């Protein structure tokens, strides 16, 4: 089937994810709106948040058209044009193609590739990762010293990836400490930037 519009892609993508038990009928729209609301409170503002949503949508559409299996296994976080890729794939070519397709999207400044190639990924691992991420988000939300809306959390095989903007080093250290104290966490990797820290563009690099 040929998909001619982004709306058509989103409908078909969600239908695919529904079959996999990973999407709700309102999930796509709600997720996009939430992204704008969260990022608008941070450093990028409304226009930066809208750009990140556009980048995310175009990357997902490109991945979905290229390979549905890759689309559902690779995680994606976009923050001020910085793109963090996570997930576990069984086909090494998916890791290479995911990065190549990201660089084709206008507005991408950096690509951080944390996609792993591993034959052992399964449902139990995904469930544990989801549990860790949920606990991490809850812990940050109830910590008065952390502005949780400035952070994105992704967990892959027990490794917690932190993305976003930290108000200062003390806040970031607190976020990292929370992650390390969650049961099942093997490693914590932070790609959060400090408030006001410039983003060095890597556009054009592969």
Image (cartoon, helix red, strand yellow):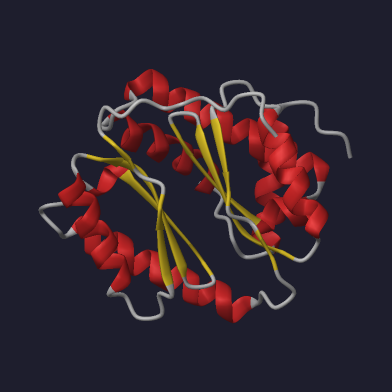
Work out whether 135 lies above or below 191.
Answer: below
Q: How many marks?
A: 0
Residue farthest to the right? 1
The percent coordinates of residue 135 (x first, y second) are 32, 69
The percent coordinates of residue 200 (x first, y second) are 46, 26
For the C terminus, which image quadrant?
Answer: top right
The percent coordinates of residue 187 (x first, y second) are 42, 69
* Image position of 189 (left or right of 179): right
Work out whether 198 lies above or below 19.
Answer: above
Q: Residue at x 34, y 33 (%)?
A: 39
Task: Classify residue 111 by image quadrant.
Answer: top right
> In front: 13, or 181?
181
> In front: 108, or 141?
108
* Image position of 191 (left or right of 90): left
Q: Residue at x 72, y 45 (%)?
A: 98
Work out whether 16 lies above or below 168.
Answer: below
Work out whether 187 lies above or below 37.
Answer: below
For the N terminus, which image quadrant?
Answer: top right
The percent coordinates of residue 171 (x first, y second) are 18, 50
> In front: 18, or 146?
146
Q: Residue at x 35, y 22 (%)?
A: 46
* Image position of 181 (left or right of 168): right
Residue farthest to the left? 144
């Amino acid at each position: 089937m040929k998909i001619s519009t982004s709306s058509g892609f989103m409908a078909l993508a969600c239908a695919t994810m529904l079959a996999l038990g990973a999407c709700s009928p309102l999930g796509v729209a709600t997720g996009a709106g939430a992204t704008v609301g969260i990022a608008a409170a941070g450093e990028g503002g409304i226009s930066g948040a809208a750009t990140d949503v556009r980048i995310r949508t175009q990357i997902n559409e490109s991945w979905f058209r290229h390979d549905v299996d890759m689309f559902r296994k690779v995680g994606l976080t976009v923050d001020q044009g910085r793109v963090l890729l996570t997930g576990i794939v069984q086909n090494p070519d998916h890791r290479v193609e995911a990065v190549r397709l990201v660089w084709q999207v206008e507005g991408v400044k950096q690509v951080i590739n944390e996609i792993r190639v591993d034959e052992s990924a399964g449902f139990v691992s995904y469930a544990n990762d989801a549990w860790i991420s949920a606990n991490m988000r809850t812990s940050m939300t109830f910590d008065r010293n952390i502005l949780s809306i400035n952070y994105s959390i992704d967990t892959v095989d027990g490794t917690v990836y932190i993305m976003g903007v930290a108000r200062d080093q003390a806040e970031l250290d607190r976020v990292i400490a929370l992650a390390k104290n969650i049961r099942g966490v093997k490693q914590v990797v932070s790609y959060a930037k400090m408030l006001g820290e410039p983003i060095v563009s890597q556009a054009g690099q592969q």
